[in-house]
Amino acid sequence: MRMRRLPVVALGAMLVGLLTLVTGTGRMLAPPEALAHKAKHTPDQLAAFQEVFMDQVKVGDLLFHGDGATAARLNVTLSKTGMACAMCHPFASDTHPHEFPKFQEQMNEFATLRDMINWCIEKPNEGVKIDPNSEAMK
């Protein structure tokens, strides 16, 4: 059994070596038709994307820090206790967004980050959970 695998492993190593020589990087290059966009984005387009992104970040930051006007504008009740997300998570500490989805012990189920955000809103803050597809959850 072991002797039969040796030629397969050797062939695989040779293919990797060949790809490295052909591409010069060891990566397979995607054919031009496989690219998502036919042309690269212009600097103006990239600036517009960044502006829209930062507008959304600002809204999230206001909600995270308990801004009542933003919550009212988005028709959400994040807390009835006077607590804001930032009070338990200063500088977004102890949030671990990269770990989701995962099993969440407090909920006793597999949860997404949005599920956990709603759990925090409902349980400790006594607020009303947010629709996962709403503007406030972006």
Image: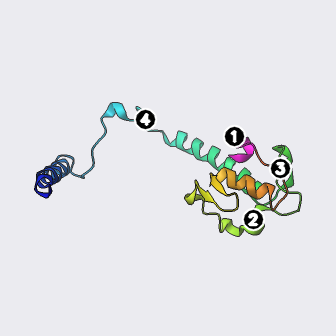
Label 2 neighbour load within 10 Å: few <14, some 14-19, many 20+: some
Residue at 50% over, 43% down: 43
* Residue under numbered circle 4: 36
* Tag 2: amino acid: Ala
Tag 3: amino acid: Val
Mark 4 vs mark 3, CA separation in Å: 39 Å
Q: Which residue is mark 3?
A: 128
The kind of residue on which mark 4 rests is Ala
Apparent side of residue 63 relative to residue 6 in the rendered image (left or right): right
Is any part of residue 109 visible from this angle? yes
Q: Is residue 79 left or right of residue 104?
A: right
Helix, strand or loop at mark 1:
loop
> Counting residues from the N terminus, which is met first, the one under dot 4 or under dot 1?
4
Q: Residue 133 bears which disc, if any?
A: 1
Badge 1 amino acid: Asn
Residue for point 74% across, 52% down: 118
Q: Are marks 4 and 1 in contact (CB under 8 Å)?
A: no
Q: What are the residue bounds of the magenta stretch?
A: 131-138
Report the mark closest to the observer, 4 or 1.
1
Does 15 lie within the magenta span? no
Which residue is labeled 2 in the image? 86
**Image position of 90 (left or right of 73):** left
Q: Earlier in the sequence, mark 1 or mark 3?
A: 3
